[in-house]
Image (tube, rainbow, N blue to C red):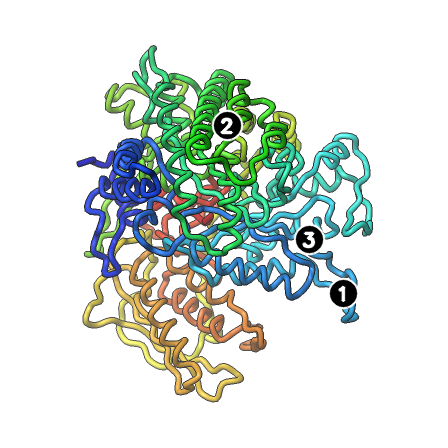
Amino acid sequence: MTRFSAAISEQIWDMKYRFKAPDGTAQDVTVEDTWRRIARDLAKVEKDPEAWEETFYAALEDFKFLPAGRIVAGAGTARRVTLFNCFVMGTIPDSMAGIFDMLKEAALTMQQGGGIGYDFSTIRPKGADVKGVSADASGPLSFMDVWDAMCRTIMSAGSRRGAMMATMRCDHPDVEAFIKAKSDPARLRMFNMSVLVTDPFMDAVKADGSWDLVFEGHVYRTVQARDLWNRIMQATYDYAEPGVIFIDRINAANNLAYCETIAATNPCGEQPLPPYGACLLGSINLARLVTGPFTEAAQIDEDALAELVSTAIRMMDNVVDASKFPLEAQAREAQAKRRVGLGVTGLADALLMVGERYGSEEAARLTERWLHAIARAAYLASVQLAKEKSTFPLFDADGYLASGTMRGMDSDVRDAIRKHGIRNALLTSIAPTGTISLFAGNVSSGIEPVFAYAYTRKVLQKDGTRTEEEVVDYAVQMWRDLKGDAPLPDHFVNAQTLAPADHVRMQAAAQKWVDSSISKTINCPEDISFEDFKDVYMMAWDTGCKGCTTYRPNAVTGSVLTVSDEKPSEAELPEVIAHSGDEPATPHGDVIYMSDPLDRPEQLEGATYKLKWPDSEHAIYITINDIIISGHRRPFEVFINSKNMEHFAWTVALTRMVSAVFRRGGDVSFVVEELKAVFDPRGGAWMQGRYIPSILAAIGGVIEQHMITIGFIAGEGMGLKSDPKARVANLDTPRSPACSSCGQYEMRMVEGCMTCANCGYSKCG
């Protein structure tokens, strides 16, 4: 039986990927059962299923090939979930009916677990005439707010929040509003946002020329291109968004340019897709393919790499047939083009093992070599599948081989495609692999550098005690196993010590042999000058990247935690009906997500609050009971009651759901923010001098004030109150925001997604 190389790997498997019956009984007893389940399911469509099952199992064994999390969790379970990670939805019509049809499709897609992307450039700008109704258009940003609210209510498969990408062309009249939208820290938090930058715009930026903002042939105004570029740069410098997508470069390189036009990407940007486009993802674990690690002879076994890639492509092609799809249009698009996105993880660890410094010229050369080997093997494997099973239905040899990507491909591969066709229209992509990399032994994620060599995580046990465990990077642990206490060599670098140019160099090297795109974050120091920051983006453009995403610590994205000891005044609190117990309210402390809920004691202490909604005849009574763990008070359950029977069903549902969340532990203050964000289309009410958008938002406010009173959170709109036993918060030192899943301050920008290093939670789907 395989032993996990790290405790966190087994925990990730159990929490996210292990198949369990509805009552929680494990169907996958070991990780080998998980591999067997996937292999058997993906081999079903083969003429010799048993033989291919063994081949597929061998590829999965020892974490060599890592299908994306949705495949690992869903394949062979008979659950009605999509195995595809990401979608770009249909083109949004510029009409009210069409817009809300698209909203419905988005909800259905996220309900099954898919992250989605939309281009909002097709909606007329704010203030434009709406013919036939004598009104002015509200503009795309207003509809993005509607999408954002919808996404907050959809819990996707695997207990992940839905994730979305919004794009807008650089020549849309509302692009300036789009650029600054996320300067408001409460707005559009469910979206990643990127500007679609065209080649003519970049030419105008370099020439300091003028630039027209236009919609349907009408020029709304003219700006200086460089000024608009600087606005994009200033926004992402200040609050990490929007990103930049070089859309003309993407379309020129697209193998399918002859039959589709791309205007959006999936949430993390590695998959530029056409309307209703879908892509499934998987990664080759390069760290497992290094022979003789930390010796002079260390190298990637390229024969084993080619064989593994060939098997992985076959498995992913079979997923196209095995997966369910939220919409019929997505199924048709996937079947017509059969695109897949095979990438890598563990690149930085592999470089460490062969003695190269991530970001160096030699590391970039090796990266290009390895990615070339993967691309070549992938295309040849897909040609073989075409000979055996037929080409993708929309294959046209002349159009396909005319693309920018194929013109750079090896001549023998091109000849094979012309002669036999190809099974999959696109084959390679570098996707975010944060959680799946933890599952595989904490290998470095995607093509990112090692973020940290080691860190300590605290785990709350059911009895209230805490245990600590060290989480060590895969290559670092291997060094320790081989070399003992010998100091790490000079070529060991991590994300904290690299220059931004090193990141760009590695992204550009990988992009040469990736036919889709790459999800990567270029980490920048907080004190980088604005001019140097702009140079990062220009370097990405000049070196052939298809997009650029940076992360610089800033206040808007929550990198600095401010702790306040102020308590709300009595006048600001709802009326307290009853309160029992004299346990003092103490600072909360760092509580970690648990796979099993806390047991309920026979007696709990709490408080009941009376809430009178102006339009309701009867008051709502909210009881919040607390539990005390190691001297720290935290909310444990909620009861919501009213004589108004119109409220009965949703108050019962809310009672059960919120209580279930509270009993799992962690920083549950996010429940407050979710409730406070709910608006009632019929209108809210003014209460105590402020506008409350709904009854649910009012309930959220009551829960928030209770959390402040007991010392669980620091203040309104703030996270956990600091624990004096934990590390002391230095207000001058940037600190990661708390993870909404486990409560630890380990959220980091990785591959374009805020990802928790402690539990693997990612805000991207």
First reached walking from the N terminus: tag 3 or tag 1: 3
Label 3 vs label 2, nearer the camera: 2
Query: Of helix, strand and loop, which one carries label 1?
Result: strand
**Residue 452 is at least partly visible in this image:** no
The first of marks 3 and 2 along the sequence is 3
Occupied quadrant, residue 489: top left
75 on left or right of 601: right
* Residue 134 left/right relative to 319: right
Residue that mark 1 sits on: 130
Q: Nearer the viewer, residue 255 or 645?
A: 255
Q: Is residue 675 above or below residue 118?
A: below
* Mark 2 Cα shell of 10 Å, populated few (<14), some (14-19), many (≥20): some
Q: Where residue 122 is drawn, which disc sits there?
A: 3
Report the Cα–Cα distance between label 1 and label 2.
Answer: 52 Å
Query: Crowding at label 1, few (<14), some or many (≥20) Cα neighbours within 10 Å?
Result: some
Q: Amino acid at mark 2?
A: His
Measured as percent of width and height from the top left, residue 203 is found at 75, 32
Numbered circle sitting on residue 420: 2
Specify the farthest residue to the top: 296
Q: Is residue 268 above or below residue 671?
A: above
Q: Secondary structure at mark 2?
A: helix
